[in-house]
Amino acid sequence: MEALLEAAVRLAVPLLLAALGELIIERSGIINIGTEGLMLCGAFGGFAIAVASGSVWLGAAGGGAAAACVGVLFAYFVVVRRADQIVVGTAINLLALGATGLAVRALYPGMAPVSPTFGTVAVPLLSELPVIGGALFRQTPYVYLCLLITPLLAFALARSRPGLRLRAVGECARAADAEGVGVSRTRFAAVLLGSLLAGLAGSALSLAQSNTFTEGMTAGRGFIALTIVIFGRWRPGGIVLAALFFGAASALQHRLQARGTDLPYQLTLMLPYVLTLLVLALASGRSSAPADLGKAYRRESR
């Protein structure tokens, strides 16, 4: 049980980071289905910089920066040019898939090298706690980053002035603008911060869960992160539970394959994605999304 919980937390971390980033973006009223592409850019950027520098910490920072740069492109078209958010997000996914595939083949002909990776760090005393000790306090730095970011984000959205402005823009951009809140500035900043977190999520795949980069290694995790935001009802606490749920499903899938069950392995691989569809079906009637989600704002149309 303890090993399963530890694996569930480890596998949930990239989903949680990406979902928290998407939460910030959606709370501003923008829906970004390009999270998959941002994670892929973060995975490749983190891997390439870690290989070039020999530093896994620089790699993680580079992964976040790579996704943030792509986030600037997304924000320009969506916030400044007011292009269709779904179309731009789809374009980001296609661009990231093609660009990272081309880059890895151009930089590393034949086979991608092995990169430095994050090891587990045990917190004294806390790592010896029964059941949760190994799951929460004998993990990579990405887990500790999540333990830090999640309560800070929950507090910021509920109590801080920037968080309240962000929520106001997502609920009614016109009213927020009338009160002097810069709608475009707030949304642009939200996209950048959310993209940074998505990039860190991607770097966790190449620098903590693997030691190399393969084309399309995100394997739909960005879309699962979108589902997690819906399942978590746009609240950090709910998103944590939803991410753990999907992490446990992935851990169970790996365990079933390792034990050599009679089920075809294709069925076990389908498990997280089938759960994604079920969650979307169950949550569709209980949505509490921001009121202005997906709506472009034009100040002159007031």
Image: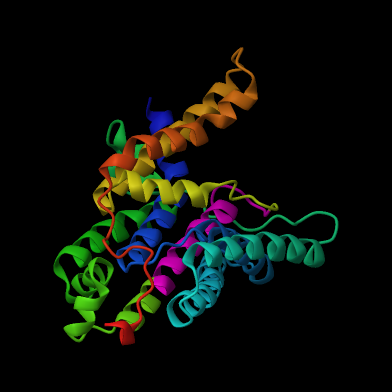
Coordinates of residue 18 in the picture (x, y in percent): 44, 56
Tell me the quarter of the image containing the C terminus. bottom left
Number of labelled discs?
0
Range drawn in magenta: 191-213
Residue at 38% over, 46% down:
228
Coordinates of residue 191 in the picture (x, y in percent): 41, 71
- Return the residue nearer the eye: 218 or 164: 164
Coordinates of residue 122 in the picture (x, y in percent): 38, 47
Q: Quadrant of residue 8?
A: top left
Q: Is residue 194 magenta?
A: yes
Q: Is residue 109 above or below residue 301?
A: above
Q: Is residue 70 magenta?
A: no
Furthest-front residue in this view: 301
- Colour scheme in use: rainbow
Relative to 154, 277 lies left or right: right
Furthest-left residue in this view: 159
Residue at 16% over, 63% down:
158
Relative to 183, 45 lies left or right: right
Q: Is residue 199 above or below residue 231?
A: below
Magenta region's main secondary structure?
Answer: helix
Relative to 86, 213 lies left or right: right
Q: Is residue 13 visible?
A: no
Q: Is residue 91 visible?
A: yes
- Return the residue nearer the eye: 218 or 6: 218
Residue at 74% over, 66% down:
103
- Return the residue nearer the eye: 48 or 191: 191
Coordinates of residue 188 in the picture (x, y in percent): 40, 78
- Return the residue nearer the eye: 302 or 50: 302
Tell me the quarter of the image containing the N terminus. top left
Furthest-top residue in this view: 262
